[in-house]
Image (cartoon, coloured by chain):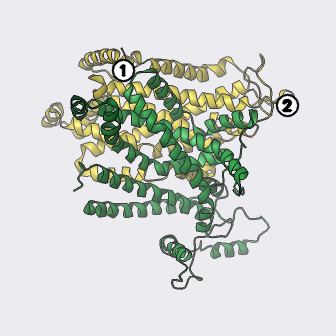
Chain colours: A green, B yellow
Amino acid sequence: MLKYLSKRLFFAIPTLIVISFVLFALLDLAPNDPTGNLPQTIPQEVREEIRESLGLNKPFHIRYFKWMQQFFVNEPLNLIEEVTGLEIGDSDSRLRVRSWLTRSPVVDLIIERLPQTLWVVGLSYIVGIMIALPIGVISAYKQYSWFDQIGTFISMVGFSVPTFFTGLVMIIIFSVTLSWFPSTYDTTHVVKDLQSLWFQVKQMAMPVMVLAFYNAAQLSRFMRASVLENLNLDYVRTARAKGLRDRSILLKHILRNSMLPVITMIALGVPTIFTGAIITEQVFRVNGIGQLLITGIQSADIPLVQSLSFLFAVLIVTFNLLADVIYGILDPRIRYE
Amino acid sequence: MKLDKLARAGQSIQEAREHPSPWMIVWIALKNHKGALVGAGVFTFIVLAVLIGPLVYSIDPQLTDTAVRNQGMSWQHPLGTDNLGRDMLAQMLSGGRIALAVGFAAMLLSLGVGTAIGVVAGYYKRLDGPLMRLTDLFLALPLLPLLLVIIMLFRDTLRAAFGPERGIFFLIVLGIGITSWMQTARIVRGETLAIKEREFVLAATSMGTTGLHIITKHILPNILSPIMVSATLGIANAIITESTLSFLGLGFPPDFPTWGRLLFDGANFIGIEGATARVIWPGLAISLTVLSVNYIGDALRDAIDPRVRNK
């Protein structure tokens, strides 16, 4: 297991380096000028100075390595300092990845936006899983019953309808027509007492439900297929022959076995919900990292976009690795060479 | 009862297998799957509507008439009008044309790239490792952010080169195509590996047939069914991705609105009397198209899946 893990890590690191290079090169090759958005009255010399201060006149490989150093060495060091309070080396003159638009370090921007995204996305994923698993199990157990038919249809709809449409339909129904929930997410809202907590629940309800519905649709289909595959296996027949009740066969034997691929699926899905949240955050005006990315793209804020997209890539690679590891731990039949 | 039906489907597919025609499999799959039959009907209707519709319903989608702004459904404007008095039905039809054209073109591109990489990786052992590493690398890319970035960066260049409409069309098709071929490549590689070991390929090889000939004449025809499943999923994915990009304001410009763009523009007018429908119609069109395509894909997958087929 350890050997396998180190081998996988050995592959993950070059993957990340190649991805970082691709992202950097793509953004660098593009015909784009960071001084393009500045007022026309700024003379050419000043423009050149601004470009120089951003380090743009350096050759490509130097800028790439500087960015790597900032991203992989300087920023982690800063984070460690902030958490532990220790000072490691010369922290004041350490170069940081700065946003071109706000001039503040990109990492600070991300940390500022992360809680909103984690709350909405994390909660929606948990809600989605909690809806999907029972539905998937019951659908499979009562295959072709009305419950299965309706469940399959709804999950097909949830899987096909884009989240921005479900989100807007929910806004039309629940905030415009019924005015139950606010249509936008107020990040400045502070939870102090029961009343403000209730408001927080109300403003989170719609974005969470939209994402939860989408996640549940995909997961329940997967869960159903997984249980179906196990239903006719020999160990189920043995359990039945021993006289075990259906309920305990389903909950103890089948569920455990069919959860294996589902758990992998859940781990693999974590990064995609982060990118999927970009849309939901846009619909409900949640100012999370998805919205940060969109504003960064609209204002051509290259360092911000670079760092955020790379962060998404890190998430994908990490969770792929995690999924493999979890699968190996949970399923003793899997033996990694 | 349903099992019975599946069994019958399995039988007739096995008969079809004796005269191997993938279109036969498509037909049988659709015939035996109620959802897919409805899906195929809806999809055909939508395709015909956007192809023939603008010829019959000849109101110019860009014609503004401020006297009839934000109107609801009426005989004059069956789906109402937008805030500039443009006819929604005409916009929906022309938007659907672009959306479906993007869907088909991007699907064909991603299918082409995926099949080529998959077949080459499966057939030539030497290239298997590098090509599959490339596939893994692409799978680790954050696709939606990457697509947004690509469109932001190259939008203006392509617009200058090919004109506003065609430029963005090429860009989006290319973007979706090169970010969605990986699943096809994996599936095709797996199927190629299996077919490669069969006797008829060995026979062809022993007669001195070249690799290219074996791939085009012996392998590709035999893996057509999984490729067709990939194609349906590809159309659904491309339509969703295009509308997502347009919805985020990084897709088609407002003068060539696709369904996603219409939704994006309509979203600003939610709550205004008569404007709510501007969100509903394009959203419904996207959803129905994707849903129907997914149902067709589901039926096809069942038809070629031996575990379902042999039941």
Task: Determine which residue is flagged by label 2.
Answer: B66
Label 1 Cα neighbours within 10 Å, binned few <14 / some 14-19 / many ≥20 = few
Q: Are marks 2 and 1 in contact (CB under 8 Å)?
A: no
Horizontal relation, residue B130 to residue B199: left or right = right
Q: Residue at x 19, y 36 (%)?
A: B209
Q: Quadrant of residue A142?
A: top left
Q: Which mark is residue A52?
A: none
Residue type (three-letter) at the residue carrying disc 2: Thr
Where A67 sits versus B134, above or below? below
For the N terminus of chain B, the image quarter is top left
Circle 2 Cα neighbour tier, 10 Å, few/some/many (<14 / 14–19 / ≥20) = few
Measured as percent of width and height from the top left, residue B181 is found at: 42, 42
- Chain label for disc 2: B
Residue B272 quadrant: top right
Residue at x-position 67% and y-position 42%: B253
Q: Is residue B185 left or right of residue A310?
A: left
Residue A243 image position (x, y, % from top left): 24, 29
Q: Residue at x 42, y 50 (%)?
A: A267
Determine which of the numbered discs, if any, sits on residue B23 in the image: 1
- State the quadrant of the C terminus of chain B: top left
Going by the numbered disc 1, the residue's amino acid type is: Trp
- CA–CA distance between discs 2 and 1? 50 Å
Rendered image quadrant of residue B206: top left
Tell me which chain the residue with mark 1 is part of: B
Q: Nearer the viewer, residue B29 or A127?
A: A127
Dot 2 falls on a residue whose secondary structure is helix
Badge 1 marks a residue whose secondary structure is: helix
Where is B203 relative to A120, above or below?
above
